[in-house]
C-alpha cells in the first residue's frame, strides 16, 4: 500500500501490523522515533491533523535526503508530492485503500484472492468495486468515455486514451532496440518479441508457439476447422476476420490500391506491396537453411517446411497431414465430393483448379 507526504497518524482499534509488512513497519517506527504514539497509519490526508504533518515532513526529509516523499508499499522515494500521488495509483487507488480500511474496522478482512464484489447479472466476482463497475458495462453496453474529436464512445478510460492517439498521432511507447514508436503499450510488448524471438502462446495440439494470443486463436482453428466469420452475402465462412474482410471486397469489387508501374489494382496495400516486388525484383525473405530468397513471407514459410518436414494442416476426417493449407483444402474435397471448378466450354466440374486447366486444353487445343 502507498502513503503520500500528507499522511497522518490516528488512533483506532486496528493494529499497525495489519497495515504493513514487519520490515516496512519496523523501519517506519524506528526512523520516525515514534513521533506519535498511535496504532495505525492512514493512507489519505486528514485535515484535522495538519499540525502533526508539519512535524512529520522535515523528519522524512532528514531521513531520505532530496527525495523526501516516501512510498511505504515499495520504499520508492520521490522529489515532489504530486509524483508520489501518481505513483500511489500504480499500487491501488485511494478509493480501494479507504474501502480496505473500512473492511478492517468492520472486523472483516478480505484474504488475498477473495472477490467480494459480485455481478448481479452473472456469477463473476471482483476484488475491487471499480472492476465490477467496468464489468457491468459489458451487460449494459454503457460507453461513458466519449472522444472529443469524433462520435466514438468507450467503456474504459484507458481505451479512450489509446484511441485519442489515432487523432494526435502520438506514439509515446518507444522500442529500445530500434526507432519504432507505438501508440499502445501492448503493441510495443508484441513488437519487442520480434527482437527477442519470444513466443509465449503455445498450441496444445502441436509444438507451434506464437508471439500474439490472437495468432494462436487463429491457428487453433486449423486443427478444429472452425470458421466463425461468416459472409453476409454468401455462405462462405472464414477462420480469420481479415480473410472475411478481404472476401467481402470480392462482392463490392473495391480495389483502391493502384500500382504506379502498371494498371494493376488491389484490394489491400499489402497486396500492392507484394506486387511491386515483381517490378523491382526484391526478395527480402531469406531462408536461414539455404540460399533461397522469396518475395513473399508466406512462400518462405511454405519453403521452410521442406527443411523441417512440418505438416501442420491435419484432415479432420482421416489421419493425413499437409505442409500447406491449399493441399488440405484440395484433399478435403475427396471427402466432401465438392467440385467447385466448372469448365466454361462444357458441363464438367473438377475438385482442383489444375485439373480444370488441363481439361480446358482439350477444348482450346
Image: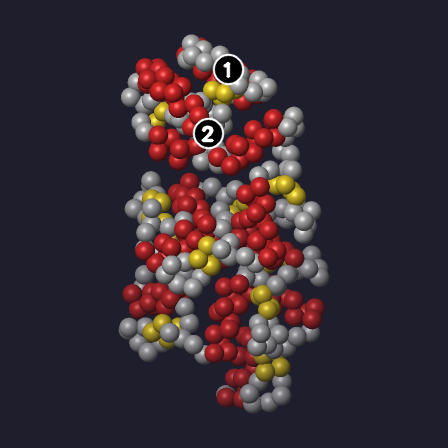
From the viewer's perspective, is 11 left or right of 317? left
How far across and down, in percent of the image, does residue 126 sit? 61, 41
How far across and down, in percent of the image, does residue 211 sit? 49, 47
In which quarter of the view is residue 356 placed?
bottom right
In which quarter of the view is residue 331 placed?
bottom right
From the viewer's perspective, is 181 left or right of 134? left
Instruction: Between residue 115 and residue 330, name the one nearer to us.
Output: 115
Q: Is residue 359 above or below residue 259?
A: below
Q: Which residue is mark 2?
A: 44
Q: How is the image coloured?
A: secondary structure
Q: Is residue 266 above or below residue 96?
A: below
| Residue at screen point 43% across, 23% down | 49
Instruction: Between residue 320 and residue 276, name the one nearer to us.
Output: 276
| Residue at screen point 65% across, 67% down | 332
Q: Dot 2 lies on which element? A: loop
| Residue at screen point 45% across, 35% down | 89
Q: Earlier in the sequence, mark 1 or mark 2?
A: 1
| Residue at screen point 45% across, 11% down | 34
Q: Which residue is mark 1?
A: 38
Amino acid at each position: 500500500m502507498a502513503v503520500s507526504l500528507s499522511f497522518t497518524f490516528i488512533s483506532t482499534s486496528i493494529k499497525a501490523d495489519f497495515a504493513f509488512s514487519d520490515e516496512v513497519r519496523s523501519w517506519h517506527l524506528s526512523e520516525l522515533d515514534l513521533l506519535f504514539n498511535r496504532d495505525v497509519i492512514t493512507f489519505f490526508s486528514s485535515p484535522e491533523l495538519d499540525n502533526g504533518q508539519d512535524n512529520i515532513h522535515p523528519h522524512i526529509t532528514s531521513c531520505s535526503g532530496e527525495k523526501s516523499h516516501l512510498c511505504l508499499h515499495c520504499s520508492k522515494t520521490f522529489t515532489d508530492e504530486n509524483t508520489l500521488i501518481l505513483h500511489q495509483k500504480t499500487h491501488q487507488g485511494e478509493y480501494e485503500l479507504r474501502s480496505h480500511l473500512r473492511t478492517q474496522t468492520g472486523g472483516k478482512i478480505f484474504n488475498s484472492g477473495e472477490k467480494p464484489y459480485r455481478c448481479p447479472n452473472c456469477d463473476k466476482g471482483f476484488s475491487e468495486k471499480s472492476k465490477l463497475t467496468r464489468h457491468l458495462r459489458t451487460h449494459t453496453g454503457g460507453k461513458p468515455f466519449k472522444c472529443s474529436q469524433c462520435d466514438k464512445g468507450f467503456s474504459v478510460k484507458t481505451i479512450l486514451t489509446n484511441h485519442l492517439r489515432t487523432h494526435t498521432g502520438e506514439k509515446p511507447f518507444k522500442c529500445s532496440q530500434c526507432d519504432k514508436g507505438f501508440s499502445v503499450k501492448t503493441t510495443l510488448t508484441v513488437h519487442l518479441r520480434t527482437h527477442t524471438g519470444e513466443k509465449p502462446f503455445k498450441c496444445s495440439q502441436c509444438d507451434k508457439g506464437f508471439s500474439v494470443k490472437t495468432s494462436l486463436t487463429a491457428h487453433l482453428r486449423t486443427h478444429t476447422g472452425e470458421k466463425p466469420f461468416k459472409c453476409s452475402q454468401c455462405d462462405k465462412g472464414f477462420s480469420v476476420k481479415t480473410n472475411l474482410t478481404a472476401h467481402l471486397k470480392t462482392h463490392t469489387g473495391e480495389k483502391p490500391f493502384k500500382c504506379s508501374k502498371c494498371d494493376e489494382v488491389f484490394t489491400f496495400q499489402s497486396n500492392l506491396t507484394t506486387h511491386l516486388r515483381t517490378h523491382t525484383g526484391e526478395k527480402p525473405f531469406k531462408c536461414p537453411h539455404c540460399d533461397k530468397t522469396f518475395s513473399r513471407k508466406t512462400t518462405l514459410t511454405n519453403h521452410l517446411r521442406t527443411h523441417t518436414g512440418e505438416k501442420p494442416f491435419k484432415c479432420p476426417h482421416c489421419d493425413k497431414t499437409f505442409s500447406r493449407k491449399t493441399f488440405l483444402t484440395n484433399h478435403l474435397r475427396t471427402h466432401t465430393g465438392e467440385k467447385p471448378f466448372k469448365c466454361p466450354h462444357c458441363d464438367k466440374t473438377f475438385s482442383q483448379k489444375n485439373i480444370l486447366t488441363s481439361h480446358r486444353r482439350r477444348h482450346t487445343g
